Image (tube, rainbow, N blue to C red):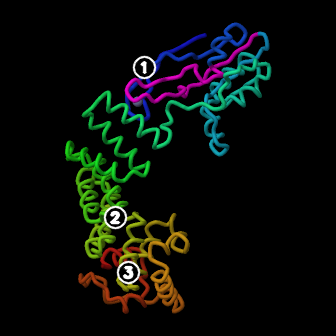
Amino acid sequence: MRSKADDFPCPICGEVLRAKLVERVDADSDGESLALLMAGRLNRLLCPVCGHGGVAPEPVLVQSDAHRTCAAFVPFTIPANRKSHLAGKFKGLAQRVAGQYGQAHVCFGLKQLREALPWLPAFPNSARGFQRFDAPGSAFHQVHALRRALKNRGGDVRLLARLGTALYASGDLKGARKTMETVVREEPDNGDAWRCLGAILLDSGQTRPAAEAFERAYRHHRDPECLFLAGVADFRAGAPLEALTRFQRVIQKRADFFHAYIWIAVVHTAEGRYGPAIEALRAAVMNGLKDAGMIRSRKELSPLFGERGFQSLMKHLEKPQAQGPHRPSTTKRGTGSGRPRAKRSGRRMPTSPIQKRRQAVKGK
Ligand SMILES: [Zn+2]
């Protein structure tokens, strides 16, 4: 049995645990460690602050001179689509293992370990699957752990913010809101907390305060996403002009912010202005090519626009295409009025990407 010391941050409360882990188990002579390994109790970490526990996400070498085998046991199972990525990560380890006995085994989870080493004794307490220490578990588990942690460290705002996020994820909007409001009272500069509060408020239907919370979040970390969410909240609060202003600010910050264009189209469509809505959609295609297919995907877009609004929009969208894609664009460029009239612009097709973008930005 060989071991090494390492640091493991608790995925729930953030406490850093320093632990000595077993790296190698001799299956011929160390039945006790082998039994612990199979029971999921070898290299088990327990956070002293929140009580979260699990097996350290580090491989253990199981070795037998008698059977001339050695397997690297990784104490978690992985979905097939991530296998090659992880196998690559453990390749060096597999080679080391192979170097010793000429056969490489990297086993993810107990089942694979048993397949690779069929001579392993059957332990009555053998675990079915392991809880990994670095996996935070369900939102409910997190809420319980964080409440425990707060009993140990009452008044720790960082923990309280984590609790607010976990409560939100668990669907307890009321509890989450109360907790996050306490956090922003204590730390008015905590942009992440404002952002989370905004999301909670938006989901609770408190759209005006949600927009304010997202705006505060934006002030602190200048992330256009916060501005975008503030716009969504504005729109839901029945303030389309404010919403458009915000979406346009988003595009000024990040021209490839695909959903800002989509939402400009949503707002225009809701107001019956199909021309500017279509321009915004075109600008979206020009600026976010990888998502362009989505515009054609009814399933994703029609809930945003509402089925009727979406149908009307699509009707308008098909019109100018039927008339040919290169109709000359006139009047608007450089006029500075910034407010295309729906009827007119709906029939016109901008010719260059820059023009399209400009029109989308102006198109309020
Ligand atoms: Zn913890």
Please give the name of the residue rendered at 60% of the width and 30% of the height, measured from the top-left corner. 130
Query: For residue 351, which numbered disc appears in the image?
Result: none
Give x and y (percent) for residue 210.
29, 60
Give percent across and percent down for residue 306: 46, 77
- C-alpha distance separating marks 1 and 2: 44 Å
User: Could you tell me residue 312's position as x and y percent?
Assistant: 47, 86
**Label 2 Cα neighbours within 10 Å, binned few <14 / some 14-19 / many ≥20:** some
Residue 205's mark?
A: 2
Q: CA distance from mark 1 to mark 3?
A: 56 Å
Query: Which residue type does callout 3 highlight?
Result: Ala
Left or right of 198: which side holds 46?
A: right
- Taking depth in this image into account, of 61 and 34 the one nearest to the observer is 34
Q: Which mark sits nearer the N-terminus, 1 or 3? A: 1
Reply above or below: 66 against 246. Answer: above
Q: Nearer the viewer, mark 2 or mark 3?
A: 2
Per the image, label 1 sits on a secondary structure element best described as strand
Q: Are marks 1 and 3 in contact (CB under 8 Å)?
A: no
| Badge count | 3
Q: Mark 1: which amino acid? A: Arg
Name the one closer to the observer, 183 or 2.
183
Q: Which residue is mark 1?
A: 18
Q: Quadrant of residue 13?
A: top left
Neighbours of disc 3 within 10 Å: few (<14), some (14-19), many (20+): some
Q: Which quadrant of the render holds ligand 1?
A: top left
Earlier sequence position, callout 1 versus callout 2: 1
Task: Give the residue type that dot 2 points to.
Answer: Gly
Q: Quick one: SS at disc 2? A: loop
The residue sitting at 30% across, 53% down in the picture is: 197
